[in-house]
Amino acid sequence: MKEYTFIKDYKKNDELRKSFSKLATETFGIDFEPWYKRGFWEENYVCYSLVCDNEVVANASVNYLDVVVGQDTIKAVQIGTVMTHDSLRRKGLARKLMEKILDDHKEKYELIYLFGDKDALGFYSKFGFDNIKETEFSMKLDEEKFKVSENKNKHNMRKLNMDDKDDLNIIMRLTKDRKPVSKVFSVVNDKYLLLFYFLYVYREHIYYFEEEDIIVVYTANEDTLQLVDIISQNEVNIEMVLNKIIDTNIKNVQFHFTPEDEIGKVIKRESTQKEYEVFVMSRGVQLPKEFIFPKLSHA
């Protein structure tokens, strides 16, 4: 019978960390080593793992974040990177790790949440998680309000290069103490997650506006702008950002965070995405009626 040893917070142990990364590569196609070697793996991300024969065979990681709801800042835990080696699934390893994480955190934190597969509805409900629905936010552009023109002046905008020292300094500075992207609902203290997405997902879509000293992450497909995030150390002005980046072919904006109503006629509807379900466990936290967790805060 195999014996499993519990271990956590071992990122400085090269053998175990590389074994964790190997399992993550096999499970999600993501090698965590570049993230670690660049110095982006901070203390906010802690692995809870089971080890057998010096190999990490199951994991669930804890992410320490601040969730901003209106005027309140809530110390929260997000559980992520939940994975088990293919040959050891359905043997209760994930359950053991979840029990350990909840024992360590549920009396200390007001909010614990995670993103999981639809197939995991029954699994997470057994621990007391509620399945909640997020809201999709989009907007049809008012061409007069947002000054759409063919001669959009983007001279103040440039793409940042993660491998350029000066550009990386800008990224590190602005992600360190970012302001909430929304007064309605935001996640902050998330620098390490932002850097993860910058390194693996949005490397080619990080734009810097020097005059405003902000980073905007966005993509465009057909007639829709995907506004992923706005990173600033000052209060975020979404209308100003849109005025700088939209051009004549853009007719709609899809927000990947919770925008504020002042920017225009935002269309709200229950999320229809099929990629994940949101599971929440809280002690008296009143989440907004309509909100979405910022995409770049997902672990």
Image (cartoon, rainbow, N blue to C red):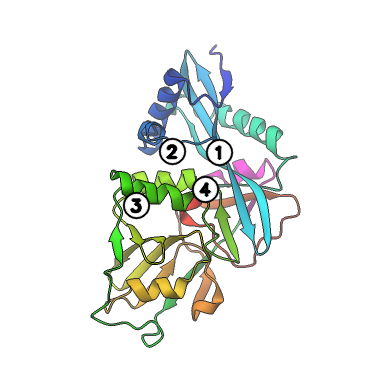
Tag 2 residue: 40
Which mark sits nearer the N-terminus, 4 or 2? 2
Task: Identify the element where label 1 is drawn.
Answer: loop
CA–CA distance in space, label 3 to label 4: 16 Å
Q: Nearer the viewer, mark 3 or mark 4?
A: 4
Q: Nearer the viewer, mark 2 or mark 3?
A: 2
Per the rendering, the mark at residue 190 is 4
Classify residue 287 by image quadrant: bottom right
Residue 122 included in the magenta stretch of the image: yes
Q: Look at label 4 and name its amino acid.
A: Asp
Determine which residue is flagged by label 1.
44
Q: Which residues are magenta?
A: 115-131
SS at mark 3?
Answer: loop
> Is residue 170 visible in the rendered structure shown here?
yes
Relative placement, left or right, of 270 versus 208 is: right
Question: Please, is residue 190 above or below residue 149 in the view?
Answer: above
Q: Nearer the viewer, residue 195 or 15?
A: 195
* Residue in the picture at 35% in, 44% down: 199
Residue 80, above or below 151: above
Q: Are marks 4 and 1 in contact (CB under 8 Å)?
A: yes
Decide whether residue 87 is among the magenta residues: no
Give residue 142's position: percent from left, percent from top. 40, 84
Instruction: Work out whether residue 74 or residue 61 is closer to the camera in this orientation and state it.
Output: 74
Circle 3 residue: 202
Mark positioned earlier in the residue sequence (2 or 3): 2
Q: Nearer the viewer, residue 81 or 195?
A: 195
